[in-house]
Amino acid sequence: MISRIVHLAALHCRCRQDKLNMRLSIKRTVQKNKKLIICLSLIVLAVDTAFLAMSFISLQETLFATLLQKAERHEEEFKLNLKMVYSSMLQMSSLISSNSNVRQALLQERSAAVPLRPQNENGKEGQGGTLRKTYQFGSVEDRPQLLSDNMQSYTWLHGVSPVWAVDPASKEKVYVGALDISTSFRQIVPLYSKLFRVEAAVLLHKDYVRSRMWNPQTKSYFEQHPEANHYVEAVSSPESMNLLRQILPKIFVRSDYKLDRIEMVHQDNIYYSVYYFPLPDAQEDTLLTAPAGFMLIWENVSEQVGHAAFNFFVNIMQAAAAFVLIEIGLLWMLNRETRLSAAEQCAAVDELTGLFNRRYFDELLDNELHRAVKSPNTPLSLIVCDVDYFKRYNDTYGHKSGDDCLRKIADSLRLQARRSSDCVARYGGEEFVIVLPRTDLHAAADIAEAARKAVQDLAIPHASSEVMPVVTITLGVACTSFLPDYESLFEAADRNLYLAKNNGRNRVEPVKVAIPPRRLPVL
């Protein structure tokens, strides 16, 4: 039991340690690649923002296109209903005009016509002709009324039929008038609104009202609302009238009353789509005269807007999830690359000196030799150096001092590789190599000589040396430009190293005086 508890505690500690190591690893990765992470995050954020913008525009265009199609369908349905009402007016007019009682009534009215002095817009009597009377059906009392020709509403649909009657005096058939049966939008709009479940209103332009239906009611309306340009002739319901007064100031109505796009109005936490279309003047040629006003229709589209908003919210969630997943993947990749880079660096770097190790040197030299083969005119030089009597140094001063000595020599050699393409590596033990791409034998010999002097100037004591009382190095130099066919570059440099050791150490072989002179270019 105790062993199991100990085992569980160990697992818990290991789990906590793994989490801590992961957090530290991610923290180091973020700190090391902070600029890269910020740049990539900004790019991903910009892509997400562009996606959301395109999604919002697409959803908005789709919503407005759908509502516009619905508005056009309502307009067609309304015009079709007007045609049906007009057909009914004609049939009713023809039916009533054939009634004998109506004919006799019109015959009596024709013989008893009285002068008519109509009123102008100021309420004064003007010049007039003969008073004519018409029958109007569909009144509030649901029975015919006999009204004057100056109607109190905008009548759009007329059913006109000529009436003929037999004159008792002459016994001849004479024309006694025309039967005009008409209806106004005050009767049509509420029925249309109820049938298609929309709210509607008919608004007439102020100039049209002044010229065609100026009466005390309209005059009083414009006196109370001097800023109004339209007169509300009909509305679907009394409740809709209050909503109309709130919606109307929020929309832009074109002068020709032609709809180019749906208007969206937010009122009392409800979204309404608002659209309109022109209404022609029924008493004139509709192709030559300006519209009398317009038909305004609005309907509750909160459900459609909510559906579009939900889709956009889903897109936001998807974009946010994609951003988070990409960021997690980015951190994971960078963390993995950082670990791999650290592992590769550990595999390629000598732990003692911090220089590249023999493995890295072998790969680098092989790559540079392949590159030199492809470019025969580009020289590649190699320097191989060895610390003189280093085994005696370890025996005299100890291995710890020997390690310190190698570190100092490595730092000194590193300073000689001034170009980014130059490479200094520890070949093994007390041996070092320097790879010099695009460097001829003369320049390589100069670098080797500078390295020899730099190590000697370190003045590291070496009492066991047979060369000098300080640590020295011996160097062998080779170049592909002066390489025998049977010998590799490393073999040539190593051969020169042993030649320098045989000639006394603390020297460079070949010496500069023994190197063939540079070949000058032929002009």
Image (cartoon, grey):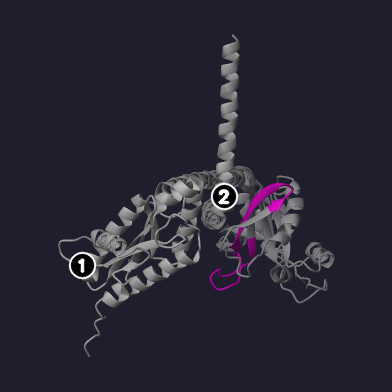
Quadrant where the C terminus sits is bottom left
Does residue 419 lie above or below 21 as drawn?
Answer: below
Question: Which residue is tagged 2?
Answer: 30
* Residue 164 shown in magenta: no
Q: Position of residue 347 (x, y in %)?
A: 40, 46
- Residue nearest the observer in this picture, 372 or 341: 372
Callout in the foreground (1, 2)? 1
Disc 1 secondary structure class: loop
Q: Would residue 47 appear left or right of 481 to someone viewing this image?
A: right
Q: Position of residue 521 (x, y in %)?
A: 24, 85
Residue type at mark 1 is: Leu
Task: Say few, some or many: other residues with alpha carbon within 10 Å of mark 1 (under 14 / 14 to 19 / 20 or more).
Answer: some
- Residue nearest the observer in this picture, 203 or 448: 448
Cα distance in 3D space between marks 1 and 2: 49 Å
Does residue 163 lie above or below 419 as drawn?
Answer: above
**Residue at 41% across / 53% down in the picture?**
390
Q: Can residue 76 be spotted in the picture?
A: no
Q: Which residues are magenta?
A: 266-294
Q: Quadrant of residue 522?
A: bottom left
* Residue 289 shown in magenta: yes
Quadrant where the N terminus sits is top right
Give the number of the disc on residue 483.
1
Question: Residue furthest toward the left?
Answer: 486
Question: Residue furthest toward the top?
Answer: 1
**Residue at 66% across / 47% down in the picture?**
190
Residue type at mark 2 is: Val
Does residue 380 lie above or below 348 as drawn?
Answer: below
**Residue at 34% across / 71% down in the picture?**
445
Q: Would residue 428 appear left or right of 5 to someone viewing this image?
A: left
Tell me which numbered mark, 1 or 2, is placed earlier along the sequence: 2
Q: Can residue 379 be spotted in the picture?
A: yes
Q: Would residue 126 appear left or right of 330 to someone viewing this image?
A: right
